[in-house]
Amino acid sequence: MIYNDTIIALATASGNGAIAVLRLSGAEAIDLANAHFRSIHSGKSLKTQKSHTVHLGHVLDDQRIIDEVLVTLFKNPHSYTGEDVVEISCHGSTYIQQEILQLFLRKGCRMANAGEFTLRAFLNGKLDLSQAEAVADLIASDNEASHQVAMQQMRGGFSSEIAKLREELLNFASLIELELDFAEEDVEFADRTQFKQLVDRITFVLKRLIDSFAVGNVIKNGIPVAIVGEPNVGKSTLLNALLNEERAIVSEIAGTTRDTIEDEISIGGMGFRFIDTAGIRETEDVVESIGIKKTFEKIAQSQVAIYLFDATEFADKGERFKVELEKIKNKYPLKPLLVLANKIDKLSETERENLEVALSAIEGSQHIMISAKTGDGVEQLTDSLLNLINTGALRNNETIVTNSRHYDALLKAFEEIQKVKEGLETELSGDLLAIDIRQALYHFGEITGEITNDDLLGNIFANFCIGK
């Protein structure tokens, strides 16, 4: 892929705002900007100005002033893309944005494709591929955890670790390939003991990175939590209390929620996606039955399940609640389950104590006494949810894999490294060992972008926003 033309795009969100930024990149970016810019004070030429300087003036279409702007220069190679880059900060009127954009398109610029500025940064060696992908993750981050992981990856924490291992493996691969050239002399240039130690170290690192994907995936996509229970026990009220807004309809009529309602919030820097489900009960209502079926589907898809029941009805319906609870536990034995006794604001002190004793006797799940209406116990619930998620790696600032493409490449690299390890243990010939090493190197290279193709780059950068 070789790009010689000059591209332009709006780098800020579309629509009216205080300001907007249009970004140009390419060999003619400064010349084109200079041709349609007039400095207010000195009449200076942008072509003679230093990199990383800002200039006040007007954008002109012939003699017509479009807007008073600030123009920022970034001369190659000291720019985001590695090319000459000009950023025009104008007033945020959509009319002004389009006028400036159309002016430069008429004068020889091309509209940038999605992610093309970052693609050029990758092609010009300013970022490796995993860092480029982290840019999109950073833009999409909506909580502290996803932001932290994206920043770490964008700064090269993940790719530098992979690149170091790949370089060491490449050195040994070169020595083994050299041995093949001297096969008749029966010499060994690669120390097999040191090579085994390297393979063991690579195996350890790969396994740690692969295991981190379980945490990374929920950090990136949010932790799905299903709220289940009988109708009218306060599931929608709990969802509203967690979100601190009237997101779900609350009614005394049983079966009000007939479909799932989802929304996300950040708790302790982690994203949680709460799913308010239809109440579980025997019903002849066709629509409600469909909702109940969806409830069990959502439990299967969630990482945590919350079983909510009405504490005021426990004396009469306690055994039925326990039966429903056992059904969920038996069907999803490995899924963390929180049992919430709701509406405790309606219980006397003695009734609360008796309920606490009864719930303590239920094994295999954690219970919490709450009032979704008053908010009592909701903080304890959010603390419990955080404790269920293994965030140790995040707290320790360890490398966490969040990208499914990286995860797939790591799995394949791990498989090839295991073949190399087995080959060393069985004293496999150098030519066969070299094949497995090459394959492992290939999958390492896929992650950082040493090995890539147009289709892969197209798929990755198509998910970026235009202007980045």
Image (cartoon, grey):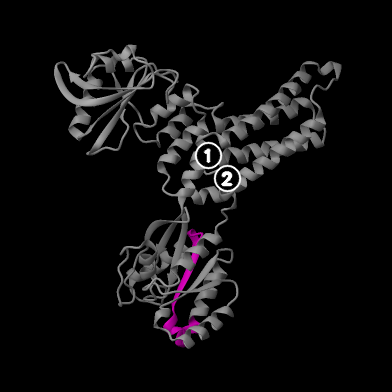
Q: Earlier in the sequence, mark 2 or mark 1?
A: 1
What residue is at 57 percent from the left and 36 percent from the top? 157
Residue toward you, 148 or 422: 148
394 within the magenta span: no
- Looking at the image, is 40 positioned above or below residue 368? above
- Determine whether 367 is above or below 467 in the image: below
Image quadrant where one finds the C terminus? top left
Extreme residue toward the left, this view = 64
Residue 34 rendering spot, x and y as whole percentages: 27, 15
Residue 297 in view in this figure: no
Labelled disc at residue 240: none
Q: Nearer the viewer, residue 356 or 71?
A: 71
| Residue type at tag 1 | Gln
What's the magenta region?
300-320
* Amino acid type assigned to the residue bearing label 2 in the image: Asn
Query: Label 1 near label 2: C-beta < 8 Å?
Result: yes
**Secondary structure of the residue carrying numbered label 2:** loop
How packed mark 1 is, by other alpha carbons closer than 10 Å (few <14, some 14-19, many 20 or more), is many
Give the total of numbered labels. Answer: 2
Residue located at (78% from left, 35% from top): 196
The dot on residue 152 is 1
- Which residue does the numbered mark 2 point to in the structure image? 397
Quarter where residue 360 is shown:
bottom right
* Quarter of image, res 163: top right
Give the position of the N terminus as an image quadrant.
Answer: top left
Which quarter of the figure has residue 459? top left
Residue 460 in picture, x, y percent from top left:
45, 34
In the rendered image of this protein, does residue 125 appear above or below residue 252? above
